[in-house]
Amino acid sequence: MNTINQIPGGVCAPQGFKASGMHCGITKKVEKKDIGLIFSTVPCVSAAVYTKNKVKAAPLKVTREHLENGTAQAILCNSGNANACNADGYDVASKMCQIASAFLGIPESEIVVASTGVIGQPLNIHPVDACMKSLVGYLSENGSGEAADAIMTTDLMKKEIAVSFTLGGKECKIGAIAKGSGMIHPNMGTMLSFITTDADITAPMLSKALKMVVEDTFNMVSVDGDTSTNDMAVVLANGLAGNAKIEAQEDDFDTFVIALMYVCIYLARMMAKDGEGATKLLECSVKGAKTEESARILAKSVITSSLFKTAMFGADANWGRVLCALGYAETDFDPAKAEVSFASKAGEILVCRDGCGVAFSESRAKEILLHDEIEVHVDLHQGPGEAVAWGCDLTYDYVKINGDYRS
Amino acid sequence: MNTINQIPGGVCAPQGFKASGMHCGITKKVEKKDIGLIFSTVPCVSAAVYTKNKVKAAPLKVTREHLENGTAQAILCNSGNANACNADGYDVASKMCQIASAFLGIPESEIVVASTGVIGQPLNIHPVDACMKSLVGYLSENGSGEAADAIMTTDLMKKEIAVSFTLGGKECKIGAIAKGSGMIHPNMGTMLSFITTDADITAPMLSKALKMVVEDTFNMVSVDGDTSTNDMAVVLANGLAGNAKIEAQEDDFDTFVIALMYVCIYLARMMAKDGEGATKLLECSVKGAKTEESARILAKSVITSSLFKTAMFGADANWGRVLCALGYAETDFDPAKAEVSFASKAGEILVCRDGCGVAFSESRAKEILLHDEIEVHVDLHQGPGEAVAWGCDLTYDYVKINGDYRS
């Protein structure tokens, strides 16, 4: 069994990657870094997944074009402005790549561009233009944290991880940074996630690995049911680890997928935990559903329910809301066999069996629900389908943060 | 053109209907009425629509059986306990009908039973048993308000309306009471609504009228995206108005539908306005969609978005969230043609054209959005589809109300 070790370094942990981040002036707050850059010293193969929202931000369109050939060498991302729904959005996103291209000395088409922030306010290119020389100059093997800072919006926690593992005796690494706190809902995207690796892998296999992993990780996170216009997950692989190139779905591919899954589960949980206004990470695991797809739909439905989320905020074992959310999910099951329990570090308590309530100690349930990581276990006893979804509680602060986001 | 006049009297406005409501002890608060009764002195034809949640409360199952023959003469409803997900739920709901049957002197199968409140706590039959003699004794032509009080849970406003209109020169009336504040989402049901009329109409035409109207009214309301286990809308028609019986989809049917629509729009708007914690009624009208169904999906998506709802709470003209919610709705349209404006009593302001922002005065927008009834007008310029949906803002109080609902 291959061991996966968590290591420091974020996106710069894999060989040959550098990063930087700084304040360029897109946001008013001068202490806030608002532009970040990730660069590989050698060309990479690349894969990406994008939001399914029909309203797509301009940088997604530009990135999609740039990644058509399956290669990229840098990722440029700003926060503070989504560059979505702007008449000049496409031109501005293209211009960002042109500017970076000049200073990085790589073709414009090798640059991935992303934006996050307010929708529908023109993005001023001047701060980007003015900062680029410095941003490129600051590129460093210790720069992952700065890039991670630069893509945060309402995020309170910096999201950064790296792991090492071996492929045929060669040490390989995967690193990642992510942002995501509001406008997050299972339907791909759901955030920005930039992943680097020095593993040697073909573009088609990298794309296959990313799609497989995203389905079980980022697509299973919901903060507020809103699927953003700007979300994307991008992975760059530069092959510097020197492993035998992964070209087919064999053992090394499986190992790579497991390592990528480790990274993305970590980020997915962090995004849920850092949901806007959240005080608790909620994890809903469904088993015994008819199919895996059915289990996914059910787990997402629970994690998305405003009533369930507020109940968890109040540490209230209101399991009827779990049943209710299962019941309106658009998938078939028999509620009469449903079993539900709540769990946390403090233990587990069964609250519903055969679709009906069982007697349980409210004080014991409260004790369990007062923890900041809550699990809801649902067993439907009607098939092999299993899935896990992550979310967070709905709190006063969510309302506060979003009641006047733009000012 | 037939005139529809709003009149007092609620469910007792139509001839031959009486109602009552009282505190029987299902809820702990002694000042809160928790059981209500509506009774027609003569037999009625009846129609109903129910929640689509797969987890259905026991009273729905009993009511569905009782309405199989298309007739009913009384509606019994308690608040404080949903009688859902209880092992003995069906027996308790049946027992409620048996008890009422004995005192009303009508067959058990002529009684509609409904419950609203907490899910998964056994409903004690004793308070129902003990109060029934009084509840029947209190039946009065002035009792609509008491019945309306009795079915309220977290509702702050009593929901009651009646209208008069003429069919072939005969004055007919429709009256209604409703409850609905949380766990409300477009997918039928979405609340309890009890409608009475003295119009003479066959059961199939009554059912057809109700289904048509519900689609454009109750199914277009969302408070929190949660579709309840208990929702139903029931209409009883006793024929005492003496109009020529409505037996086909002709002029009188159309008039009846328009009057029923008036009643249900009124209740739908009231439910949205009285959404848990709401400070504003939000109305989203979509036109220019490819089809009416597409317009419905789009309007509901906007009204359901947590980010849009919090922005409206903050009187923030964050139209990007409207575009975003349109974009992730599961229906096809071209965002590049979308036009959006906000309106209220203070006027209207265009904020987006051709899918992009237009310059507008933020202070003027604020002035408009500070009102308590806000309209969002979306024009997609790509077809004849139109629809309207109603919702409310998402506020601190929603979180407060639902963070500890059971205690």
Image: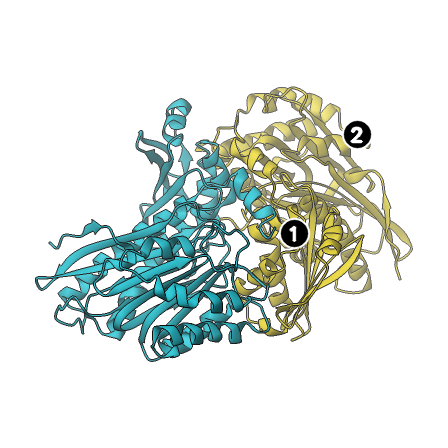
Chain colours: A yellow, B cyan
Q: Which residue is mark 1?
A: A316
Question: Which circle's residue, 2 or 1, is located before the other in the chain?
Answer: 2
Give the residue furthest to the right.
A169
Front position in the image: A252 or A320: A320
**Is B180 placed above or below A288 here?**
above
Q: Is residue B176 left or right of residue A392?
A: left
Q: Quadrant of residue A106?
A: top right
Chain to which the residue tagged by mark 2 belongs? A
Chain to which the residue tagged by mark 1 belongs? A
**Is B191 placed above or below A225 here?**
below
Q: Contact, CB < 8 Å: mark 2 with mark 1? A: no
Residue type of the residue flagged with mark 2: Ser
Which numbered tag is attached to residue A140? Answer: 2
Coordinates of residue A129 in the picture (x, y in percent): 60, 22
How dense is the environment of label 1, judged by Cα within 10 Å: few (below 14), some, or many (20 and up)? many
Q: Quadrant of residue A256?
A: bottom right
Coordinates of residue A300 in the picture (x, y in percent): 61, 57
Q: Residue at 56% x, 43% y: name it.
A: B399
Front position in the image: A229 or B15: B15
Regarding residue B333, the answer to whether it shows in the image is no
Q: Quadrant of the N terminus of chain B?
A: bottom left
**Is B261 placed above or below A331 here?**
above
Residue type of the residue flagged with mark 1: Asp
Coordinates of residue B39 in the picture (x, y in percent): 31, 67
Coordinates of residue B346 in the picture (x, y in percent): 31, 29
Q: Residue at 69% x, 45% y: name it.
A: A280
Query: Helix or strand or loop: what does disc 2 sit on?
Result: loop
Query: Helix or strand or loop: what does disc 1 sit on?
Result: loop
